[in-house]
Image (cartoon, helix red, strand yellow):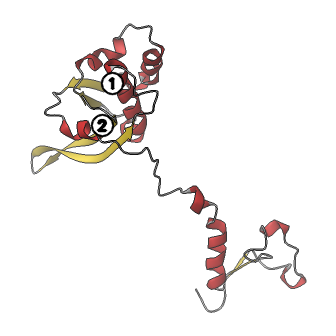
């Protein structure tokens, strides 16, 4: 077995032309952290379940869903008696899904999509195109530059001259509204 990380394929069942079909929602994977690479099979599969539920929470919250696994012992994970602190903590972490979740065994030969994701050694990179710290720190300046180019002024502020509240007011702009649209439109 050459498992290098965790992999999830999230699907949704729906009826298409009167036939039940599964539609892919997303694939998610990550490489093991150094401390996780030494876990045994049970700990690895339990980690997978907790990580998968955390990553897909926005899709699964309140829904009745099935988790397919090629590890039969995972079916008894919620009722497992153990003194392993990781497993105890993970059992507590997924309690809110207990009534909505069914864990179903599916042979690895049939279960290829998520299994393949766990075998590819990719770097762990969190990607959120809606928030890039390098870009986010420049957004206010960028927005003000756009306003300036479109002849919309921010009262008492010029790009590159500090924050608006630290600038000295110019006498001719004291009564200027915060945004002023030029007569040329936009």
Does 183 sit left or right of 40 as displayed?
Answer: right
- The residue sitting at 38% across, 40% down in the picture is 30
The spot of residue 87 in percent (x, y) is: 42, 17
Q: Which residue is mark 1?
A: 45
Q: Looking at the image, is mark 2 or mark 1 nearer the viewer?
A: 2
The residue tagged 2 is: 118
Q: Residue at x 42, y 18 (%)?
A: 91
Residues at marks 2 and 1, CA–CA distance in whole angstroms: 11 Å
Q: Position of residue 74 (x, y in %)?
A: 29, 20
| Numbered disc 2: secondary structure | loop
Where residue 11 is drawn, which disc sits there? Answer: none
Q: How packed is label 1: few (under 14 Cα within 10 Å), some, or many (20 or more)?
A: many
Contact check, label 2 and label 1, Cβ < 8 Å: no
Give the residue displayed 10% in from the left and 51% down from the top: 17
Q: Is residue 48 above or below residue 40?
A: below
Q: Residue at x 19, y 38 (%)?
A: 112
Give the quadrant of residue 50.
Answer: top left
Answer with left or right where residue 150 lies relative to residue 110: right
């Amino acid at each position: 077995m050459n498992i290098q990380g965790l992999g999830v394929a999230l699907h949704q069942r729906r009826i298409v032309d009167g036939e039940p079909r599964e539609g892919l929602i997303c694939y998610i994977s990550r490489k093991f952290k150094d401390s996780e690479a030494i876990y045994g099979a049970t700990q690895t599969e339990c980690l997978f379940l907790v990580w998968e539920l955390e990553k897909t929470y926005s899709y699964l919250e309140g829904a009745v869903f099935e988790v397919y696994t090629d590890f039969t012992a995972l079916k008894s994970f919620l009722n497992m008696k153990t003194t392993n602190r990781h497993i105890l903590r993970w059992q507590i972490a997924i309690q809110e899904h207990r009534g909505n979740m069914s864990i179903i065994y599916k042979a690895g030969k049939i279960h290829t999509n998520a299994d393949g994701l766990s075998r590819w050694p990719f770097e762990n990179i969190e990607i959120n195109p809606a928030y890039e710290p390098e870009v986010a720190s420049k957004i206010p300046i960028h927005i003000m530059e756009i306003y300036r180019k479109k002849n919309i002024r921010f009262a008492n502020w010029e790009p590159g001259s500090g924050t608006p509240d630290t600038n000295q007011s110019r006498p001719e702009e004291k009564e200027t509204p915060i945004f002023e649209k030029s007569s040329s439109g936009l």
